[in-house]
Amino acid sequence: MSPTISCEPGDPRTSRGRAALSRFSPTARSPADGAGDAPQDAFLRTTPSVFGGGVSSAKRPKHTAGRERSGPRGRRRVKANDRERHRMHNLNSALDALRSILPALPDDAKLTKIETLRFAHNYIWALTETLRMADQHGHLADYLPGSPSSVSSAESGYSAASDDFDPRSSHSSVRELNCQIFARGESYYLASVCGEDYLRNTLHY
DNA sequence: TAGGCCATCTGGTCCT
DNA sequence: AGGACCAGATGGCCTA
């Protein structure tokens, strides 16, 4: 498993990608911070409904205006449109949920759909690599920041009292380990373990 | 103003 | 038959 998904150098959105890289500056952020910080503006702009309902005229596709909707076929189409809209809203909700747990600065612009998927892919890979490295050395504490200098405990929620936890002792499952990693501030932890260059090479999209 | 992103509609296909 | 899923088309909004 490796982060094979990334922007090509010729990606027309390179400038945006560069800007996105700044998201990984070592700044603590609670997983919940991203939730709701970027309202589904487009969703809120329009009201899901069938034609003749709440869809604003500005958003209503002109190429379908005046299409017959009264017959059985039309009613079926309207129903199918409604289901499709609902399906896409569910998909967007899932994407928002994914965005909310990815490390990013609270004031960052909302990740696009493709950015979210690419970032999530690379982020999972980075976390997996982190666990693998920790596992190789048999002690996760070796991979924790040597000193809290790079991360203040106030910022990260990093507690000196819990610094010496052993993932193999009381809570050794991968899930527990991940919880510990998240508790210590995702990007902080990864940056301190892998270095900024590592982060840039693995997490960017 | 061009290009990127997005929501929506639509018809086709597959599945239950 | 009806629902889920998909991809293409279209048009609005936003930004460089």
Image (cartoon, coloured by chain):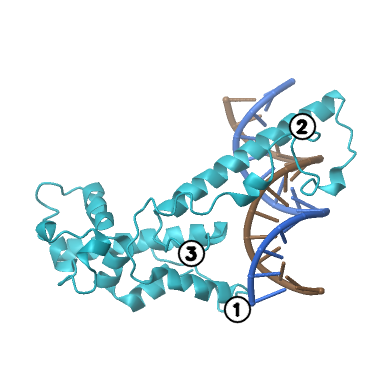
Chain colours: A cyan, B brown, C blue
Of circles 2 and 3, which is in front? 3
Callout 3–callout 1 Cβ contact below 8 Å: no
Q: Identify the residue under disc 2.
A: A78
Q: Are marks 3 and 1 on the same chain?
A: yes
Q: Identify the residue under disc 3.
A: A108
Q: Is residue A151 above or below residue A159?
A: below
In three-dimensional space, the C-alpha distance between marks 2 and 3, rounded to whole angstroms, equals: 37 Å
Give the image location of residue C4, x and y in percent.
60, 34
Please tell me which residue is depicted at 47% across the width and 63% down the height of the picture: A107
Judge left or right: residue A136 versus residue A112: left
Q: Earlier in the sequence, mark 3 or mark 1?
A: 1
Judge left or right: residue C13 versus residue A41: right
Give the image location of residue A168, x and y in percent.
12, 52
Considering the numbered disc 2 on the image, is that residue within a helix, a strand or a loop?
A: helix
Q: Crowding at label 3, few (<14), some or many (≥20) Cα neighbours within 10 Å?
A: some
Amino acid type shown at disc 2: Val
In three-dimensional space, the C-alpha distance between marks 1 and 2, rounded to whole angstroms, equals: 41 Å
Question: Which chain's residue wears label 3?
Answer: A
Please tell me which residue is depicted at 18% across the width and 61% down the height of the picture: A135
Badge number at residue A10: 1
